[in-house]
Image (tube, rainbow, N blue to C red):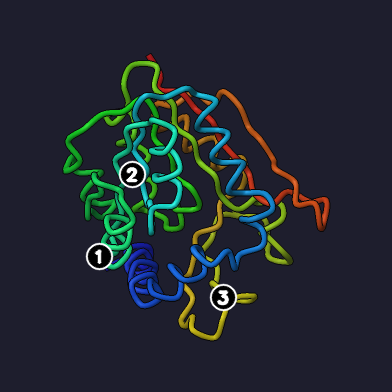
Amino acid sequence: MSRDVRTDAEVLASWQRNATPWIAAVRGGEIASRRLVTDAAVLDAVLACAPRSVIDLGCGEGWLALALARRGVAVTGVDAVPELVDAARAAGLTDCRLLTYEQVAQGALHCRADAVVCNFSLIGSTSVDALLRAVPTLLAPQGALIVQTLHPLVACGDEPYVDSWRAGSWAGFSSAFRDAPPWYFRTLESWIALLDLSGLDLRALREPLDPRSGKPASVLFMAQRRG
């Protein structure tokens, strides 16, 4: 088994262990960057595409999917963690499916939508590569992909600015969290190249600023299905 495959599995295992405190943190408004910047940023980006239907890949406990549904959008949520899927369904997300990214990449998600959104949910390496290559098959013609993720220039820290696995951290979270998942760091150039290789044309790039630091809280890629 390659290191990438093993580490992608470790990402999922960590989220399975931390599902309960994650649900509490999101629903309790404990994550300051989300309250201040990133939740509104991704919601605005999706709504700017005026979609009638959306697939939320890595929907977690369902906050974004439910926010879109309240605005009249038909939403299909997808997550690989049973506890998160159960929480989303219990909160009212009627179409929420338990699937891994590998399963989606292999064609297990039998639906299409006007937009696909991945909100801080593209953490791994090979699983993410395969997932993004499958995204055009999930999109209606001229459909949009919206990705919000850590801004590479801010998240890089003191490490070399090269694609590589990084150690995770729950710094700033409650003591209920443990064994932070590793994550795969990608440069800005690598993200853009991956979108292009996946048959998607980058239409816009946004850098929502954190009012506390004046630095980007995230980066948003808005791409369109090619052809």
**Residue closest to the eye, 120 or 105:** 120
Q: Residue at x 42, y 58 (%)?
A: 124
Q: Residue furthest bottom?
A: 175
Question: Quick one: label 2 or label 1, which is nearer the N terminus?
Answer: 1
Q: Classify mark 1: helix, strand or loop.
A: helix
Q: Position of residue 27 (x, y in %)?
A: 49, 63
Q: Which residue is mark 1?
A: 82
Where is 121 relative to 5, above or below?
above
Left or right: 123 as drawn, with respect to 36: left
Distance from disc 3 to disc 2, alpha carbons, whole Å, reads: 26 Å
Query: Seen from this angle, which residue lies furthest top?
Result: 227
Residue drawn where x is 37% and y is 40% of the image: 132
Q: Which residue is mark 3?
A: 170
Question: Quarter-wise, where is residue 166 in the image?
Answer: bottom right
* Type of amino acid at the residue the image marks with label 3: Trp
Measured along the vertical axis of the image, is residue 41 above or below residue 31?
above
- Residue 18 image-quadrant placement: bottom left
Q: Give SS at disc 3.
A: loop
- Amino acid, disc 2: Leu
Mark 3 or mark 1: whose residue is earlier in sequence: 1
